[in-house]
Amino acid sequence: MFFVPESKGKTQERMIPLIRAWVARGLAKQGFRVRDIATALSITPAAVTQYVKGRRGGNLKELDRFGSILDALLEKAGKRVRSNLGPIEMAEIMDVIYQISAASTGQRLLQSRSGEHEDVEALKMLKERLQLELIAAQRCLELTNKINDEYSKLLLRMIASDSIRHADVVSQVISWIETGHTTAFQPPDLSFLKSMLEIEDKAKESSLAEKIEIPHPVAKVLLNSIDMDEEKHEKIVGKLLRLLPRSSK
């Protein structure tokens, strides 16, 4: 089953209890108390009991093939409980839903047959890249569950997340080409873009990789990746600014 036929809002609304139920049952299997699971998921103990007994949350079998994505959230929830760090944020649940939806859409496109189209070579190239991105994400997530080094886990999850986002972009381009439909460009607000540039400028002023001393070699790589992302974001915002109509600048 794919999570794509409905509108995005309906898909997200339907998947939130599924994700919570999956994590609740996973934590219960690890021996966590009902009240601690409730705190981790920002729900009531009664809801946890319903999830664990399968009386609420829906059919979780449709999530089985996305276990490698969900395992990261399950592990994070367990750490929150053990360290008393508070509940999983809704943004973290929504990110998991996004990753599942993006991966599911990519798989559906790979399984679909392409009809006659003038851009057949472009579609072939895009589908090959889509498959590579999905494979890379899957392998990184699978390896994450086999290692104990927390920094290496973070690095692999980051690569997997990037690959899923790449797959989402490629999937969208494939859909545009196959359907012949594109959406009109809706430029971001100028004040928003300028505020983002200010944030990126401030972030670049303090390079984490250069100023934070930490002995773990992978931790250094992770900090460096943050600095690289800040540079990338600044370039992206700059390009968006150049796309704005002159009248709005």
Image: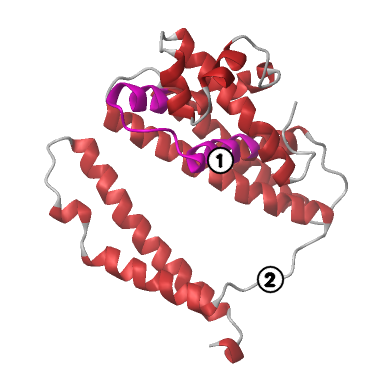
Q: Report the amino acid beneath label 1.
A: Met
**Residue 23 coordinates in the image, percent (x, y):** 52, 21
Q: Is residue 61 above or below residue 96?
A: above
| Residues at marks 1 and 2, CA–CA distance in whole angstroms | 25 Å
Q: Nearer the viewer, residue 128 or 63?
A: 63
The numbered mark, 1 or 2, whose residue comes first in the sequence reads 1
In this picture, residue 44 sits left or right of residue 159: right
For residue 105, say whether it is visible: no
Q: Which residues are magenta?
A: 75-101
The residue that disc 1 covers is 94
Considering the numbered disc 2 on the image, is that residue within a helix, a strand or a loop?
Answer: loop
Residue furthest bottom in the image: 247
For residue 240, say whether it is visible: yes
Question: Residue, x 78% and y 50% (percent of image)?
Answer: 120
Q: Nearer the viewer, residue 193 or 246?
A: 193
Q: Is residue 209 above or below residue 40?
A: below
Considering the image in quadrants, where does the N terminus appear?
top right
**Residue 214 coordinates in the image, percent (x, y):** 13, 41
Considering the numbered disc 1 on the image, is that residue within a helix, a strand or a loop?
Answer: helix
Q: Is residue 92 above or below residue 169?
A: above
Q: Report the amino acid beneath label 2.
A: Phe
Q: Nearer the viewer, residue 156 or 199?
A: 199
Q: Main secondary structure of the magenta part?
A: helix
**Residue 49 coordinates in the image, percent (x, y):** 56, 13
The residue that disc 2 covers is 185
Question: Residue, x 42% and y 73% (percent of image)?
Answer: 195
Snapshot quadrant of residue 5: top right
